Amino acid sequence: MERERAKPAKLVGEALWRRHDATSLEHCRVTLTEDMHVVQGCIVALMDSQPCQVHYAISCHPDWSTRSVHVGMAMGETMYALQLRRDEAGEWWRDDERLSEFHGIADVDLSISPATNTLPIRRMKLHHGESASADALWVRFPGLALERLPQRYTRIDEHRFTYESRGGAFTADLEVDGQGLMVRYGEIWERVTS
C-alpha cells in the first residue's frame, strides 16, 4: 500500500501571545496548502487555579470558513478532546452528532485564544469603515461547552478593527498584522514576538 504524500505547507504567519488578565502564553502558526489554511497552536495557562495545556488545529477552506476543529486539553488528571467538522451544507458535527443549532455558522471561536479572530477578519474582507456581523460557534474553556456567539467587526483602518459580541456587551480594539494575526487584542492579549 502506497503511503499518501503530505501536501506541502507554506508558513503564512506565526505569533507568540501573552495574556494580561490571566496566566497564559500561546504559540500559533498559520500555514497554507493548495486547498486549505490551517491555524494551529499550543497554549499553556492557569485555569481554575490549575495548570493546563491546550493544543488546537483548525482547518479552513480557501475563503477562511471553518472546515474542522480539533482541540486537546490536559488539566490535572483529566484529558479533554473535542472534534468538530462543518460539511458543505453548513452543518456542524461533533463526531456523528449533528449540531443543528449552529447551522450556517462559518466561524469557530476559541474563548482562550485570539487566533480565531483571524478567521472572520480574513473571510469578511472589510474595507475601511465597513462593518459586518456573523455568529460564531464559541468553544468555552475549560469545559469545552459550545454556544452561538453573535459578533460584529468594524474595520477602522488597515490594521485596526473594533470587535463586539453579544450586541456590544463585550467590545475590544483589535490590532492585526498584514496576515490578520493579532498584534494586540484590547487589554487582554499582546504579541510578544512574530
Image (spheres, rainbow, N blue to C red):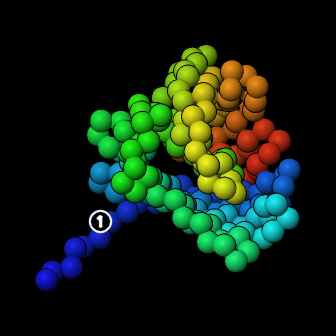
Task: Please name whichever residue, 127 or 65, is drawn nearer the observer in this view of the structure.
Answer: 65
Which residue occupies 55% across, 21% down?
Answer: 132
Image quarter of residue 106: top left
Q: Is residue 123 visible?
A: no
Residue 186 left/right relative to 42: right
Q: Position of residue 36 (x, y in %)?
A: 35, 51
Q: Position of residue 136 (x, y in %)?
A: 54, 35
Residue 2 left/right relative to 88: left
In the displayed structure, 50 sits above or below 164; it is: below
Task: Please name whichever residue, 155 or 117, is drawn nearer the observer in this view of the structure.
Answer: 117
Q: Position of residue 67 (x, y in %)?
A: 38, 48
In the displayed structure, 38 sits above or below 148; it is: below
Task: Please name whichever residue, 101 or 55, is drawn nearer the observer in this view of the structure.
Answer: 101
Which residue occupies 49% across, 39% down?
Answer: 107
In the rendered image, the residue lying farthest to the bottom is: 1
Which residue occupies 79% across, 54% down?
Answer: 19
The number of numbered badges drawn on the structure is 1
Q: Secondary structure at mark 1?
A: loop
Question: Circle 1 is placed at which residue position?
Answer: 7
Q: Position of residue 91 (x, y in %)?
A: 37, 39
Image quarter of residue 63: top left
Residue 33 left/right relative to 141: left
Quadrant showing the N terminus: bottom left
In the rendered image, the residue lying farthest to the left is: 1
Question: Quick one: label 1, few (<14), some, or many (20+) residues within 10 Å?
Answer: few
Image quarter of residue 32: bottom left
In the displayed structure, 76 sits above or below 10; it is: below
Which residue occupies 73% across, 41% down?
Answer: 185
Could you tell me the amino acid type at mark 1?
Lys
Quadrant showing the C terminus: bottom right
Q: Is residue 133 visible?
A: yes
